[in-house]
Amino acid sequence: LRYTIRKREGHHCVHIFKKKMIKILIAEDEIPALNALEKQLKSIAGGKAVIVPAANGAEAVRQSEKLVPDLAILDIEMPVLNGMDAAKIIRHMHTDCRIIFLTAYKNFDYALSAVRLSADDYLLKPVSTDTLKAKLFELFPELNDKKSDKAEPAGSFKFKAAFYIERHYAENFSLEQVAEVFRLNPFYFSRVF
């Protein structure tokens, strides 16, 4: 979770706004391709997405029950349960989930099935990072926020401050009090955080 601190109408109260992480489910039966896709997605989305891998369609369906994905990127040809059948189940459970199919085959029947399932795209493997980035930015414009707040390392001041605020959010405290905990000037704290 990521947090921002804001002043409201002259008050120096600390307000916490949880920013929604985009949840992406990826299913690919070829492990090297799965790892490469996960790495591509992490480089594109940074700390703004939770990426959950699955090795086949059945595992993708199980993972989707827990994750409730915003996007499912599914290989079509997989053992146990293929990507088309997995997409039908996932779409039935999560009607707002976006679907992108991946395949190594230029097969008209696959493309037609993808259209019938209201898929958001049908991409041929291997997918370039630029193609994937363009599609993700089209589906989720918030990923392309140039002012993005990248995930902070666990030892950083921002991480520690966010952790402190999260642990004490039910308490009534001010910006000055939080700044004092970290031995910082309140004005500086409000600008940095």
Image (cartoon, helix red, strand yellow):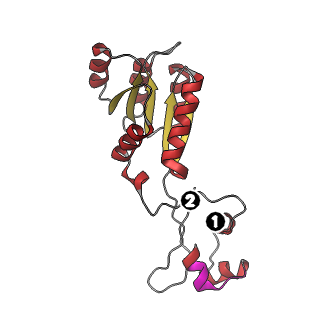
On the image, numbered disc 1 is attached to which residue? 162
Kind of residue at badge 2: Arg
Examine the structure image and report whether residue 184 is included in the region drawn in magenta.
Answer: yes
- Where is residue 150, by image quadrant? bottom right
Whether residue 21 is visible here, answered yes or no, is yes
Which quadrant: the N terminus? Answer: bottom right
- Where is residue 153, by image quadrant? bottom right
Examine the structure image and report whether residue 50 is included in the region drawn in magenta.
Answer: no
Residue 2's tag is 2
Which quadrant: the C terminus? Answer: bottom right
Residue sitting at 44 percent across and 20 percent down? 83
Q: Position of residue 77 (x, y in %)?
A: 45, 15
Judged from the image, the secondary structure of the residue bearing numbered disc 2 is: loop
Circle 2 residues within 10 Å: few <14, some 14–19, many ≥20: some
Q: Which of marks 1 and 2 is nearer the N terminus?
A: 2
Whether residue 65 is visible here, answered yes or no, is no
Whether residues under marks 1 and 2 lie with C-beta atoms below 8 angstroms apart, the answer is yes
Q: Nearer the viewer, residue 16 or 110?
A: 110
Q: Where is residue 70 in the image (x, y as percent from the top left)?
A: 43, 40
Q: Nearer the viewer, residue 8 or 159?
A: 159
Q: Nearer the viewer, residue 61 or 151?
A: 151
Instruction: Examine the residues drawn in magenta and state their main secondary structure.
Output: helix
Residue sitting at 44 percent across and 31 percent down? 73
Image position of 184 with respect to 27: above or below: below
Question: In this picture, which residue range is highlighted in magenta?
Answer: 183-190
**Distance of mark 1 from mark 2, alpha carbons?**
8 Å
Q: Where is residue 7 in the image (x, y as percent from the top left)?
A: 49, 79
Kind of residue at badge 1: Ala
Residue sitting at 33 percent across and 17 percent down? 106
Residue 63 in the figure: left or right of residue 113: right
Q: Position of residue 76 (x, y in %)?
A: 42, 19
